[in-house]
Image (cartoon, rainbow, N blue to C red):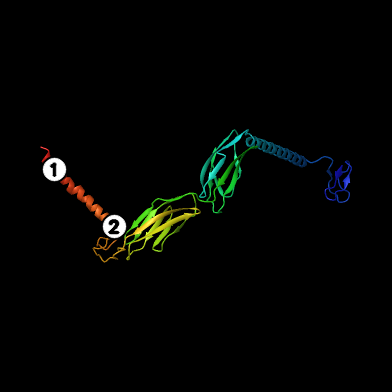
């Protein structure tokens, strides 16, 4: 079969020229060499693409199978300790993981708990409880089909509070002292007279007294949280509360020196001690030299 390349009229193989426009006929009974080459290339490309798709599917299936094996390899899973009690202020606790699998994960925890994960353990950080009520929650650990649970119970009230110092003494010129408050709570409050100031500075508490130009005075700073409290007794020097600084010798509190009696009692005791240390020891050595030949 032959065909005119211009009008595409087909003729028998015996014809060589088109009767319509005179163009030489071309044989269309077999594909050209170019068409054959293109067909071969297309076939090769299709085969490569098929191999790539099949290989990709095999790799994906293998990865999924390997992942399922890794995730479900454990036959047992234990957490120690599995129960934790926390005070109102919160705190940290380390939990050990015992299992025979490859990986483990935490799929549930309370909102008021933070967790730091390691290889075979994790640290629970319980936040302070400001709700005023006790609360309870649980952490769920999973390795494949194995599950373990850690129960956390946190108190909602303080059970102890203690100051590092029970008594503080200030001179009449005032000043400041620092103490620490040990408590299992997280929100103590202080009650104190107006001439005393209390402020919290990081891990310490600063107690300050104003200058005192009047009589010797005392006061209490009470640290309280929930149903527990602790008291710091404050004394500050000043004028004698009996003679009011007049310096009368008849005053039994300041001994006629016009100041706080407590300080002068201490001063008198120190003088007695000094006399004993210096004078009496000298007399004793003198007596020993006389009596012992």
The residue at which mark 2 appears reads as 263
Could you tell me how many numbered marks the image carries? 2
Q: Which label sits on residue 187?
A: none
Answer with left or right where residue 152 lies relative to residue 292.
right
Residue in front for this viewpoint, 214 or 10: 214
How far apart marks 2 and 1 lie (CA) works out to 35 Å
Task: From the top left corner, tell me how far across and down residue 260 is, in percent.
Answer: 30, 60
Residue 122 against residue 197 in the figure, above or below: above
Task: From the top left corner, tell me how far across and down residue 120 is, in percent.
Answer: 55, 37
Q: Which label sits on residue 287?
A: 1
Mark 1 closeness class: few <14, some 14–19, many ≥20 residues within 10 Å: few
Asked if the residues shown at circle 2 and circle 1 are in contact, with their CB atoms under 8 angstroms apart, the answer is no
Residue at 20%, 48% (x, y): give it.
276
Answer with left or right where residue 199 lies relative to residue 114.
left
Task: From the top left corner, tell me how far across and down residue 93 is, in percent.
Answer: 52, 43
Residue in front for this viewpoint, 122 or 246: 246
Tag 1 or tag 2, which sits nearer the N-term? 2
Residue at 57%, 44% (x, y): give it.
152
Residue at 30%, 57% (x, y): give it.
262
Answer with left or right where residue 254 lies relative to residue 51.
left
């Amino acid at each position: 079969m032959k065909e005119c390349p211009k009008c595409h009229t087909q003729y028998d193989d015996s014809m060589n020229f088109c009767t319509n426009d005179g163009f030489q006929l071309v044989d269309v009974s077999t594909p050209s060499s170019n068409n054959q080459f293109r067909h071969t290339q297309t076939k090769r490309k299709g085969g490569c693409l098929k191999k790539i798709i099949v290989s990709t599917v095999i790799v994906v299936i293998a990865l999924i199978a390997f992942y399922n094996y890794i995730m479900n390899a454990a036959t047992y899973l234990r957490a120690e300790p599995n129960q934790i009690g926390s005070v109102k202020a919160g705190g940290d606790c380390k939990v050990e993981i015992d299992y025979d699998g490859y990986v483990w994960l935490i799929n549930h925890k309370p909102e008021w708990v933070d967790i730091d994960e390691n290889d075979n353990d994790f640290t629970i950080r319980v936040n302070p409880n400001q709700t005023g009520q006790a609360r309870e929650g649980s952490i769920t650990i999973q390795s494949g089909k194995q599950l373990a649970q850690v129960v956390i119970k946190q108190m909602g009230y303080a059970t102890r509070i203690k100051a590092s110092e029970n008594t503080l003494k200030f001179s009449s010129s005032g000043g400041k002292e620092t103490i620490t408050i040990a408590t299992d709570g997280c929100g103590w409050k202080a009650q104190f007279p107006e001439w005393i100031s209390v402020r919290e500075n990081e891990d310490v508490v600063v107690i300050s007294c104003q200058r005192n130009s009047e009589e010797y005075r005392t006061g209490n700073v009470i640290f309280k949280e929930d149903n527990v409290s602790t008291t710091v007794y404050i004394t500050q020097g000043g004028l004698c509360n009996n003679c009011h600084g007049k310096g009368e010798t008849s005053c039994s509190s300041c001994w006629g020196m016009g100041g706080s009696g407590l300080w002068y009692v201490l001063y008198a005791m120190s003088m007695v001690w000094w006399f004993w240390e210096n004078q009496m020891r000298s007399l004793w050595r003198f007596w020993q030299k006389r009596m012992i030949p």
